[in-house]
């Protein structure tokens, strides 16, 4: 994974949510030796699209999982799993 600190990544994402949505949203982060994941409410679908655009331009490998409850058609959660960030500009923004 591109070299950046987990805590700085969290600050970057939380700050970005505050700018784009006008508020900080609840985001559950997991730091693993192989990836970083973040999960948040499905009501922020447009925010997820914005993040996909950012990561699509600057990340060499990531997945987006759309999670919903079996008895509903509504998206309950959106999960990003980021394996590698290779864009130097994005790494500089986070560090």
Image: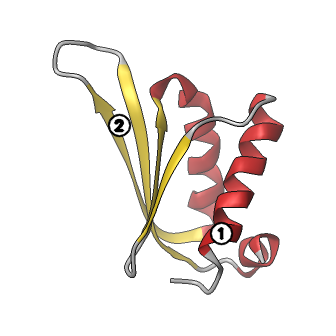
Mark positioned earlier in the residue sequence (2 or 1): 1
Q: How many marks?
A: 2
Task: Provide residue 55's location: percent of width, then percent of height.
Answer: 59, 59
Side of 66 relative to 53 (left or right)? left
Residue 66 is marked as: 2
Question: Who is closer to the viewer here, 59 or 74?
Answer: 74
Question: Who is closer to the viewer here, 6 or 90?
Answer: 6
Instruction: Please name which of the two marks, 2 or 1, marks the residue nearer to the observer.
Output: 1
Q: Name above or below for residue 27 compared with residue 12.
A: above
Task: Provide residue 67's location: percent of width, then percent of height.
Answer: 31, 34
Task: Determine crowd level at label 1: few under 14, some 14-19, many 20+ residues with C-alpha closer than 10 A.
Answer: few
Q: Quadrant of the C terminus?
A: bottom right
- State how far apart marks 2 and 1 are (Cα): 24 Å
Residue 47 is marked as: none
Q: Name above or below for residue 43 compared with residue 24.
A: above
Query: Which element carries disc 2, helix, strand or loop?
Result: strand
Residue at x-position 64% and y-position 78%: 5
Residue at x-position 65% and y-position 81%: 4
Q: Name above or below for residue 20 compared with residue 1.
A: above
Q: Which residue is mark 1?
A: 7
Side of 46 relative to 93 (left or right)? left
Residue at x-position 23% and y-position 23%: 69
């Amino acid at each position: 994974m591109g070299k950046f600190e987990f805590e700085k990544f969290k600050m970057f994402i939380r700050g970005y949510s505050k700018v784009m949505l006008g508020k900080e949203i609840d985001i559950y982060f997991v730091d693993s030796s192989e990836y970083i994941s973040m999960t948040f409410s499905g009501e922020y679908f447009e925010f997820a699209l914005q993040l996909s655009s950012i990561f699509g331009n600057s990340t060499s490998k990531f997945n987006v999982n759309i999670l919903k409850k079996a008895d509903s058609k509504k998206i309950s959660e959106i999960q990003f799993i980021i394996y590698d960030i290779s864009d130097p500009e994005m790494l500089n923004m986070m560090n």
